[in-house]
Image (cartoon, grey):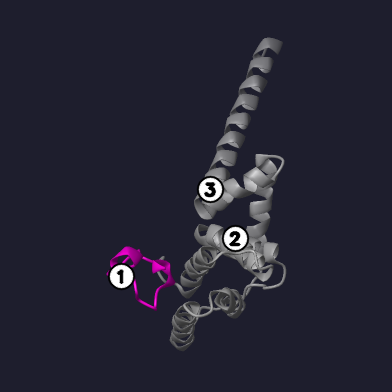
Amino acid sequence: MSPTQVIVIVLVVLVIAAVVAAVVVLGRRRALKQRFGPEYDHVVAERDSRSAAERELRDRERRHAELTLTPLDPESRARYAAAWEELQVRFVDSPADTVGEADELVSRLIAERGYPTGDFSDQIAHLSVEHARTLTHYRDAHDIHLRNTRGEASTEELRQAVVHYRALFADLLGEEPVGQAAGHRTPQQRHPDSPHDVTNR
């Protein structure tokens, strides 16, 4: 075999290895995008590079796998659903207090499911593996909650916060997103004076 043939063979092997590596990377990227949805783009925007963001997301998957998550039994699910209904009724008379109560109720549910409830960024990281579709809602609700503690949130923003909390709350309960469950009326279809749905206010 001539030196030229050896060089050609080496080049072909290198090209094949590069193609295989690219396919593997694209496959992993596609899997991360499918699992994390909009959270993938959020993390990419926060990190210095796409590869750094993907390392972060894979680390989240690793840490999530170490958790012992507990599904809710029917009794607990019914208890939380009833607590949320009571919370929505109280919003009419005390919107500022209700947002704080919503934050506490969601935190209790997160803890009961087996997720850490300390640092908010850690909460987001752990929740993102299975609840990425509702994380934007949770971030928005948390931001309004913090502004509410400083007396800076309007009543409309407080209403929005409860709606945002409800999105993650329903996801953790294993329900369909509000307005999308089979036979579930959207807020526009409910009576506008109903005290049981703050999304109408």
| Residue 176 screen position, x and y as percent | 39, 67
- SS type, badge 1: loop
| Residue 16 screen position, x and y as percent | 59, 28
Dot 3 amino acid type:
Lys
Could you classify mark 3 by the number of other residues whose Cα lies within 10 Å: few (under 14), some (14-19), or many (20 or more)?
Answer: some
Q: Image quarter for residue 199?
A: bottom left
Q: Is residue 22 above or below residue 71?
A: above
Q: Is residue 17 above or below residue 76?
A: above
**Residue placed under numbered mark 1 in the picture:** 190
Work out whether mark 1 precedes mark 3 in sequence or the reverse, and give the earlier one: 3
Q: Nearer the viewer, residue 141 or 112?
A: 141
Label 1 with label 3: CB-CB less than 8 Å: no
| Label ID, residue 131 | none
Tell whether 57 sits left or right of 90.
right
Is residue 193 found inside the magenta-colored segment of the image?
Answer: yes
| Label ID, residue 33 | 3
Q: Disc 2 to disc 1, how far (Cα)?
A: 27 Å
Position of the C terminus, as image quadrant, is bottom left
Is residue 151 found inside the magenta-colored segment of the image?
Answer: no
**Residue placed under numbered mark 2 in the picture:** 139
Could you classify mark 2 by the number of other residues whose Cα lies within 10 Å: few (under 14), some (14-19), or many (20 or more)?
Answer: some
Work out whether mark 3 precedes mark 2 in sequence or the reverse, and give the earlier one: 3
Q: Nearer the viewer, residue 21 or 51?
A: 51
Residue span colored magenta: 178-201
Q: Image quarter for residue 118?
A: bottom right
Is label 2 or label 1 in front?
Answer: 1
Position of the N terminus, as image quadrant, is top right
The residue that appears at 39% across and 78% down in the rendered structure is: 196
Q: Disc 1 to disc 3, how far (Cα)?
A: 35 Å
The residue that appears at 57% across and 60% down in the rendered structure is: 140
